[in-house]
Image (cartoon, rainbow, N blue to C red):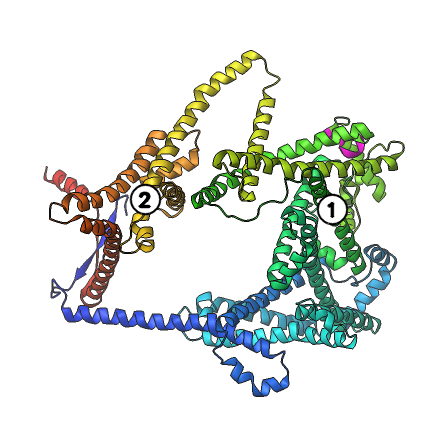
Amino acid sequence: LCNHQYKFTPVYHPDMPTILPIREVASGMAYSLLKAVRCWIHYSIVVFSWLIVVPLASCRINRSLFKGPSYWIWDFTADLFKAQDVYADCIQGLTAIMLALCVFISLIWLREQILIGGFQMPVEIHPEEAAENMRANQPFAGEIAGDAAGQGAEEEAGVENENNWQLFEWERAGEELTWDRLFGFDGSLVFLEHVFWVISLNTLFVLLFVMWPFYVGYFFSSAFNITEYMKAAYFDGFITTVLGYFILGFLLFLCHALCGALRLVRFHRTLGMCYLMLKVVLIVLIEVGVFPLFCGWWLDMCSLPLFAETPESRLKWFYDAPELSLFVHWLVGMVYVFYFASFILILREVMRPGVLWFLRNVNDPDFNPIQEMVQYPVIRHVRRFLASVLVFALTILICVYCPFRIILRFMPSTLPYRGSNRSDLPFLSLFFELLLLQVILPTLLEQSHTRQILKVLIFRWCKVVGKLLGLTDYLLSRENNGAVPREQQNDRGRHLLAAEFGVLEEDLDRNLGAAHHMLLIGGRSSTQHQPYVKPPYFLFRIIALLLVICVSSITFSLIALTVPVTIGRKLMHCITGTDSHYELYTLSCGLYICCMLIRLFTVSFSYIPRDFNMLADDAKAWLSTVLINWLRFVVAVISYFGLVAFMFGFLVELMIVAPLRVPRFGTALPCLFMIWLLGAFYCKIFCVCMVTIGPNWRMRHAFETLYRDGPRNMNLQAFMTNAVLPLFLLFGNLLAVPYTIVYAIFPILGCDAEDQLQYGKRIYPGMLSFFLLFVFLAWQFKKVKAMMGKIRNERYLLGQRLVNFDSKRDERALSSLVV
């Protein structure tokens, strides 16, 4: 205030005692304790209701819906309150509730997407036919629009008022209802009503979206005698429900067509909306669920020689754990699809636009898969799905199955990979796991130049293959090939686009809406294609190109499957002297060495065009700057991850690990190597915690400066002074002081060797317990002090006075007045 600090001082009653009476303190403590107990009881009821009552009731009600009316009458109550399988039923109930919530949110979002994309078009008319009908029957469309407007004119005002009223009510309810009030953390019991509504709505959801389709599919499968085949798949309930959804979709399509023929506009629109939502859900289920699962199973069947497995063992695993088997294969398929799509994106960046016309460009800003699912007919999605299955199956067959056959034929010692992590030296396994997680994997994942190297390799391959087959102009764009400038390409693209839409080139900018409309209804625009010169015998050249692609894919797969693991095995053999190692370690080490060699080759290749003097100058600069920086970095690493890490790990071993693991009269045999490894891991966790959630002091500033500047610009003196030295002194004192007390002071007091050994084992956990007790008492002292201040303020506080906080400034002002 007025450019200087200030504070408020309390003004108490003159009769306030210096020390509060014990009765008032005791009553305040009793009130605080009663409030804490009441709060604990309320929160316990909230947690019990949301985590036990709601999922348990939902699971058992949902299960009872599929057991028939006789079960509902006689056994429902007993089954609802039984004490068996409570934990499993709670997990299943929580899963069902979360699934229902996700489905509800997805349906709302899908409805908005359908309305945004336009719902005037019939659901199963081809986009080209729809465009022709819109152009040919424009007066008829206007007549229908007029009829619809005439029919709805009487209800327009009422509907508008109703919508406005609902919107107002939703906004008012949204302002009153908060998350704390919804879940009951505000202290009220209103959440019990919310618990009842959650159970009721979840039951209604199961009735509409699970039970009804299930019985539709069950009646259909019973009518055609295919129930036994579904039971053999171990997921007969899910398959029956999906079958019911397909039948309901077909019935919705027929009813929608019938309502359209009878001109029942409202039913036609409602059934169309339901059909589109069901259609999109089923297509998403097939493309996101079935297709990755197929890719995972096919990839597993083609890679059986990798671990010397057989189809019978895979079937046995499926019969033993069907859910786990399906999840693992689905996850593997999703990873494969993701990396395949990433590779296609790299190919699009290198190759000529239009070469990969048969694959969808997921990186296109105009690409909207939901709108395509809504607008395109089902038969088109079926063709796309079959084409995707064919492409991915052939890719896996070429890149996985054929290389494994060749390896088994010519290099049988490479396979199988060892999939078990058994070692006679456990600390070596721990060392390799920490090396893999802390060094190798972060380095491989942070290789930003890998994408550029892959693009260069693809470009060189296209240049070589294009020259051999005469397809350079077909594979590479004119810009990459250096034949046509970009301005000429843009002019040619504009000319082709104007020719396709039948307009003049100067009118093209004014007809971008037509191009966007063509993209919206399913047409293709020539802006994504670049013309090329078609050489003679083009078909035979394309066939030869496909053969070269197959051979190149097989060669690259052979290199990827043999070279890294061979290098890793040789390295492991040189380190440990044995050959039985987990192949994850060998493969990771081999990939790390290969990446480092490729990086060294690319850096060295950039220096080849220079002369000797330039290389000498660069070497001097490197010796004067980079080498010094690396020396500073090595000193910091040895100090922090060497000495401090060992002291940290040894202190944790003495305080926590040894008292829990070693019996009372036993002797700990610490492994110094494992202690250092765990200490390095603890130091990394400490560094992360200090940067993210640490207090605002100089050690945090030291770690933040190191993280911001990096190893090249590291201030070694500041890091050693503010981070390494305080930790070294702290851990050194915590290790040395108890040892000195036990083995230097206790013998003077008359303790024998056995007592010294027992005291030495217990002094470190006792010191930790004393520290935790001290922290707890300090926390309780602050709470009691705050409670006493609150009691004093409630009983004796009269007001507050604003005073100047800078007392020295008042003294200076007073002295100036005296003078």
Q: Tell how many labels.
A: 2
- Specify whether 489 is left or right of 813: right
- Residue type indicated by callout 1: Leu
Q: Which of these two is toward me, 51 or 816? A: 51
* Chief secondary structure of the magenta portion: helix
Q: Where is residue 777 in the image (x, y as percent from the top left)?
A: 23, 58
Which residue appears at 64% of the width and 39% of the height?
413
Residue 521 visible within the image:
no
Q: In the image, is residue 127 above or below residue 426?
A: below
Question: Which residue is denoted by mark 2 in the rendering?
Answer: 650
Magenta residues, as a range?
Answer: 473-480
Labelled pair 2, 1 in contact (Cβ < 8 Å): no
Q: Assign the C terminus to one quadrant of the image.
A: top left
Q: In the image, is residue 572 above or below residue 619?
A: below
Which residue appears at 64% of the width and 55% of the height?
329
- Residue type indicated by callout 2: Phe
Picture disc at residue 92: none
Quadrant of the rendered structure where residue 706 is? top left
Question: Which residue is denoted by mark 1 in the rendering?
Answer: 397
Which residue appears at 32% of the width and 55% of the height?
660
Secondary structure under the numbered disc 2 in the rendered image: helix
Q: In the image, is residue 122 above or below residue 547?
A: below
Residue 761 visible within the image:
yes
Secondary structure under the numbered disc 1 in the rendered image: helix
Q: Position of residue 71 (x, y in %)?
A: 60, 84
